[in-house]
Image (cartoon, rainbow, N blue to C red):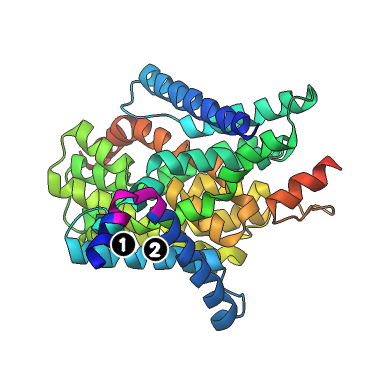
Amino acid sequence: MLEILQKATANNGLVTAFAAVGVIVLLSGSLSRRLTFGRVHGSAIAIAIGLGLAYWGGIMTGGHKGFADVSMFGGIGLMGGAMMRDFAIVATAFEVQPAEARKAGLIGVVSLLLGTILPFIVGASLARMMGYSDAVSMTTIGAGAVTYIVGPVTGAALGASSDVVALSIGTGLIKAILVMIGTPMAARFLRLKTPRSAMVFGGLAGTVSGVSAGLAATDRKLVPYGALVATFHTGLGCLLGPSLLFFVTKMVVG
Amino acid sequence: MIIYGTALLAICHLLGIFLGDLLGKALGVPTNVGGVGIAMLLLIAARAYMQSKDMMPRLTELGVEYWGAMYIPVVVAMAAQQDVVAALRGGPVAVLAAVGSVILCACVISLINRFEKAEPNQQDGSNILVGTLAEKE
């Protein structure tokens, strides 16, 4: 019996993923209403459950793809992979009001630049304080604080050692997770209400995954504005990391 | 036909990724530069153009809106496949660097957003389907 069920789910990965995520969302909705009286958004709880399952999956299987490594739920990997994520993000642009997006043009660019440079400075300085004092390691860890893709791309370009690259990926992943969980809690402090504020957030908070999940859990209609800016984040970081930011770091630490 | 909407979305997606890769190559970076953002801009432009020419029936719109509405479930699936174990194993440098940059950026976001002028007439419509329907009327 159990074997047949396992085979059926494994052979229909994406369909199983739809069902599993549907159950998670349903459960989170009722948790949100009953336990928090709607104060914590259902999607925030769903994302937290997702991260919890990812941790459990990682411990159980020793793999790197969280819950998607559990054989029955391999389809989660397809459903939540880069292809579907980007497809769904692009679709949200359908609701964008061009006039609103245009209003934030310049401030969006400014926040993108700040969102690359500030995390880099924090990451690189902390790396130096903790004993990673060469320019290559500092730049790689600093780039990881921008996003978890900028870190390894920069590290590879500069020839950083693999433990430093792993550290930079870890930094970026923790940042993305913090943004996912923290955004709905800090929404009021961040003044996340208007499309313009969402674009400032998208530029400064970085990581498409963190921004999009954080905004989804805060206010669904802000997602496209934040994502529109955040999507340039990784590209800008990969552009500046191994070039300008590395040269400046090298000049500062010698 | 509902597939027209989904195909339009797919074409914008592919074209955006392609242009993002080209841009990356032109800039000499080994990654896609803003591909998804370019795709979003293409979709916004396509929608504005097709609506002005009356080429966007309701069913075509639904072919796009379905995927926009699937966004949160996809994000939940994305969260479920993060390498949380490896992220936590990174140790104090990773945790401190991440926490530090998140706090700093949060303060800057809050500061910038405090300068935004309040608008008297802010629209509210959390439901996308209702939102687009209301717009039509």
Question: Which amino acid lies under the numbered mark 1 shown in the image of this protein?
Answer: Ala
Chain label for disc 2: A
Residue highlighted by disc 1 = A54
Does B134 sit above or below residue A181? above
Residue A12 belongs to the span the image colors magenta? yes
Dot 1: chain letter: A
Q: Are marks 2 and 1 in contact (CB under 8 Å)?
A: yes
In three-dimensional space, the C-alpha distance between marks 2 and 1, rounded to whole angstroms, equals: 6 Å
Please report the bounds of the magenta region as a residue range: A8-15
Residue type at mark 2: give it.
Answer: Gly
Place of residue A96 in the rendered image (x, y in percent of width and height, measured from the top left): 67, 40
Q: Is residue B84 visible?
A: no
Give the class, few, some or many, for how many residues have Cα within 10 Å of label 1's Cα (few <14, many ≥20). Answer: many
- Density class for disc 2 (Cα within 10 Å; few <14, some 14-19, many ≥20) is many
Could you tell me which residue is drawn at 27 percent across and 68 percent down? A56
Whether B39 is drawn above or below A222: the answer is: above
Q: Residue tagged by mark 2?
A: A50
Question: In percent of the image, x 20 and y 35: which residue is there?
Answer: A156
Foreground: B15 or B8? B8
The quadrant in which the N terminus of chain B is found is: top right
**Where is residue B27 shown, x and y percent of the image?**
38, 20
Residue shown at the point (55%, 27%) measured from the top left? B12
Give residue B127's quadrant in the image: bottom right
Residue A127 visible within the image: yes
Residue A66 in the figure: left or right of residue B20: left
Q: Could you tell whether A2 is left or right of B106 in the image?
A: left
Q: Main secondary structure of the magenta part?
A: helix
